[in-house]
Image (spheres, rainbow, N blue to C red):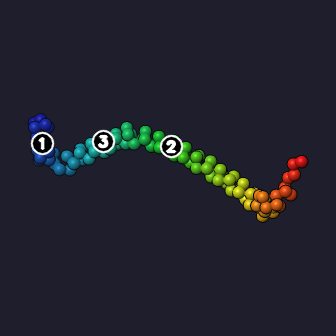
Amino acid sequence: MEVESLGIAGLIGQYGFPVVMSVGMGYFIFFIWKFINEHIDPALGDMHIALIRVIDKTRMLDQDMIRLQQKVNVVLEYREIYGKPGSGKDSEIVKTE
Protein backbone atom coordinates (compact mmCIF):
# COMPACT_ATOMS: atom_id res chain seq x y z
CA MET A 1 0.00 0.00 0.00
CA GLU A 2 1.22 3.49 -0.76
CA VAL A 3 1.31 6.05 2.02
CA GLU A 4 -0.09 8.82 -0.19
CA SER A 5 -3.29 6.95 -0.97
CA LEU A 6 -4.07 6.14 2.66
CA GLY A 7 -4.57 9.60 4.13
CA ILE A 8 -4.51 10.31 7.82
CA ALA A 9 -7.36 7.95 8.67
CA GLY A 10 -5.73 5.11 6.73
CA LEU A 11 -2.37 5.69 8.41
CA ILE A 12 -4.00 5.64 11.84
CA GLY A 13 -5.84 2.47 10.92
CA GLN A 14 -2.68 0.77 9.65
CA TYR A 15 -0.03 1.95 12.14
CA GLY A 16 -2.04 3.12 15.13
CA PHE A 17 -2.70 6.52 16.61
CA PRO A 18 0.43 6.74 18.86
CA VAL A 19 2.82 6.02 15.97
CA VAL A 20 1.19 8.52 13.59
CA MET A 21 1.08 11.21 16.28
CA SER A 22 4.73 10.55 17.19
CA VAL A 23 5.75 11.09 13.57
CA GLY A 24 3.60 14.23 13.35
CA MET A 25 5.06 15.57 16.59
CA GLY A 26 8.57 14.83 15.35
CA TYR A 27 7.89 16.83 12.19
CA PHE A 28 6.41 19.68 14.24
CA ILE A 29 9.46 19.79 16.53
CA PHE A 30 11.79 19.73 13.50
CA PHE A 31 9.83 22.57 11.85
CA ILE A 32 9.99 24.72 15.01
CA TRP A 33 13.72 23.99 15.48
CA LYS A 34 14.43 24.92 11.84
CA PHE A 35 12.40 28.14 12.11
CA ILE A 36 14.21 29.18 15.29
CA ASN A 37 17.63 28.53 13.79
CA GLU A 38 16.87 30.35 10.53
CA HIS A 39 14.87 33.35 11.76
CA ILE A 40 15.05 33.86 15.52
CA ASP A 41 18.79 33.33 16.21
CA PRO A 42 20.01 35.92 13.64
CA ALA A 43 17.45 38.43 14.91
CA LEU A 44 18.58 37.82 18.48
CA GLY A 45 22.17 38.50 17.45
CA ASP A 46 21.13 41.81 15.88
CA MET A 47 19.06 42.73 18.93
CA HIS A 48 22.00 41.93 21.21
CA ILE A 49 24.17 44.42 19.33
CA ALA A 50 21.38 47.02 19.45
CA LEU A 51 20.94 46.42 23.18
CA ILE A 52 24.65 47.01 23.80
CA ARG A 53 24.44 50.29 21.85
CA VAL A 54 21.42 51.43 23.86
CA ILE A 55 23.14 50.58 27.16
CA ASP A 56 26.25 52.51 26.10
CA LYS A 57 24.21 55.55 25.07
CA THR A 58 22.27 55.43 28.35
CA ARG A 59 25.54 55.38 30.31
CA MET A 60 26.86 58.32 28.30
CA LEU A 61 23.66 60.28 28.95
CA ASP A 62 23.87 59.44 32.64
CA GLN A 63 27.44 60.73 32.76
CA ASP A 64 26.37 63.89 30.92
CA MET A 65 23.57 64.43 33.42
CA ILE A 66 26.01 64.03 36.32
CA ARG A 67 28.37 66.59 34.76
CA LEU A 68 25.50 68.98 34.10
CA GLN A 69 24.26 68.61 37.69
CA GLN A 70 27.76 69.42 38.97
CA LYS A 71 27.83 72.57 36.84
CA VAL A 72 24.40 73.62 38.07
CA ASN A 73 25.52 73.08 41.66
CA VAL A 74 28.58 75.28 41.09
CA VAL A 75 26.41 78.05 39.61
CA LEU A 76 24.02 77.82 42.56
CA GLU A 77 26.93 78.04 45.01
CA TYR A 78 28.24 81.15 43.23
CA ARG A 79 24.78 82.70 43.39
CA GLU A 80 24.61 82.02 47.13
CA ILE A 81 28.02 83.59 47.68
CA TYR A 82 27.96 86.51 45.24
CA GLY A 83 24.26 86.99 44.50
CA LYS A 84 22.64 87.30 41.10
CA PRO A 85 24.63 88.91 38.27
CA GLY A 86 23.99 92.65 37.99
CA SER A 87 23.05 93.06 41.66
CA GLY A 88 26.26 94.84 42.52
CA LYS A 89 27.89 91.95 44.34
CA ASP A 90 29.34 90.49 41.11
CA SER A 91 32.01 93.18 41.02
CA GLU A 92 33.82 91.21 43.72
CA ILE A 93 34.31 88.24 41.41
CA VAL A 94 36.62 89.68 38.75
CA LYS A 95 37.73 93.21 38.00
CA THR A 96 39.14 93.69 34.52
CA GLU A 97 40.92 97.02 34.42
- x then y, percent, for residue 91: 85, 56
Label 1 Cα crowd, 10 Å radius (few <14 / some 14-19 / many 20+): few
- x then y, percent, for residue 48: 50, 44
Considering only order in the chain, which callout, 2 or 3, is on the residue closer to the N terminus? 3
Considering only order in the chain, which callout, 1 or 3, is on the residue closer to the N terminus? 1
Disc 3 element: helix
Q: Nearer the viewer, mark 3 or mark 1?
A: 3
Pick out the residue farthest to the top. 2
Label 2 Cα crowd, 10 Å radius (few <14 / some 14-19 / many 20+): few
Does 16 sit left or right of 83 as displayed?
A: left
Does 72 sit left or right of 37 as displayed?
A: right
Considering only order in the chain, which callout, 1 or 2, is on the residue closer to the N terminus? 1
- The residue depicted at 47 percent of the width and 43 percent of the height is 47
Q: What residue type is labelled 1?
A: Gly
The answer to whether residue 12 shows anywhere in this view is: yes
Quarter of the image where one finds residue 79: bottom right
Q: Which mark is residue 22?
A: none
- x then y, percent, for residue 39: 38, 40
Q: Which mark is residue 50?
A: 2
Q: Which mark is residue 7?
A: 1
Q: Nearer the viewer, mark 3 or mark 2?
A: 2
Does 96 sit left or right of 10 as displayed?
A: right
Q: Which amino acid does label 2 sit on?
A: Ala
Disc 1 element: helix
Q: Which mark is residue 31?
A: 3
In the rendered image, which quarter contains the N terminus? top left
Disc 2 element: helix
The answer to whether residue 14 shows anywhere in this view is: no
- The residue depicted at 30 percent of the width and 41 percent of the height is 31
Spatial CA span between label 2 and label 1: 48 Å
The reply to whether the C-beta atoms of the residues labelled 3 and 2 are less than 8 Å apart is no
- The residue depicted at 39 percent of the width and 42 percent of the height is 40
